[in-house]
Amino acid sequence: MHDMIKTLNKDLSNSDIFMANASTLDSLHNNFVSTIDERNELLASNPDAAEPTYDNLLAFEELYCIVRHKYEEILSQKNLQKTKYSHTATRQTQKLPPLELKSFDGEPENWPIFYETF
């Protein structure tokens, strides 16, 4: 996904593929953090093992933030385009014909008909 960002900066034609891949980003992040925690717990419980470290998590977090930022950027652009098109369509469909209101001619016998019209 990180490599796709370079091409997306030049051409948004692959944005749908990127968006589909990035939609699972949060679950991927949570799984990675859980795996690092489990690994570090195992390392901490074994005195002969290497020192527990979160260096991999820091590198992953940096990539995660870059990809997440691009995901949010593309999502907001798409929402802006949808809003733009929906406002255009709404304006075109909201034009109503002018109302033709009947006026009262002043004759008392025509008053009930005029009154019931409204």
Image (cartoon, rainbow, N blue to C red):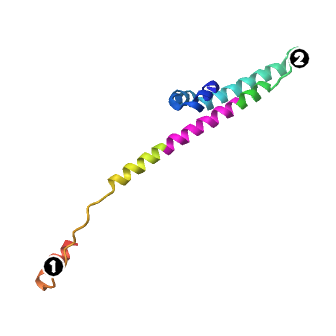
65 part of magenta stretch: yes
Q: Which of 99 and 51 is in front in this view?
A: 99
Q: Which mark is residue 76?
A: none
- Amino acid carrying label 1: it is Pro
Q: Quadrant of residue 75?
A: top right
Q: Residue at x 40, y 50 (%)?
A: 88
Mark closer to the chain start, 1 or 2: 2
- Amino acid carrying label 2: it is Pro
Start-end of magenta stretch: 63-80
Q: Nearer the viewer, residue 20 or 82?
A: 82
Q: Nearer the viewer, residue 10 or 85?
A: 10
In the displayed structure, does residue 40 sit left or right of residue 90?
right
Q: Which mark is residue 47?
A: 2
Q: Which of 94 and 58 is in front in this view?
A: 94
The Cα atoms of the two marked residues, 1 and 2, are separated by: 99 Å
Q: In this view, does 61 lie above or below 49?
A: below
* Mark 1 vs 2: CB contact within 8 A: no
At mark 2, the secondary structure is loop
Residue 55, given in percent of the width and then of the height, sits at 80, 26
Q: Residue at x 33, y 56 (%)?
A: 94
Q: Mark 1 points at which residue?
A: 112
Q: Residue at x 13, y 85 (%)?
A: 108
At mark 1, the secondary structure is helix
Q: In this view, does 111 lie above or below 69?
A: below
Quarter of the image that includes the C terminus? bottom left
Q: Residue at x 76, y 21 (%)?
A: 39
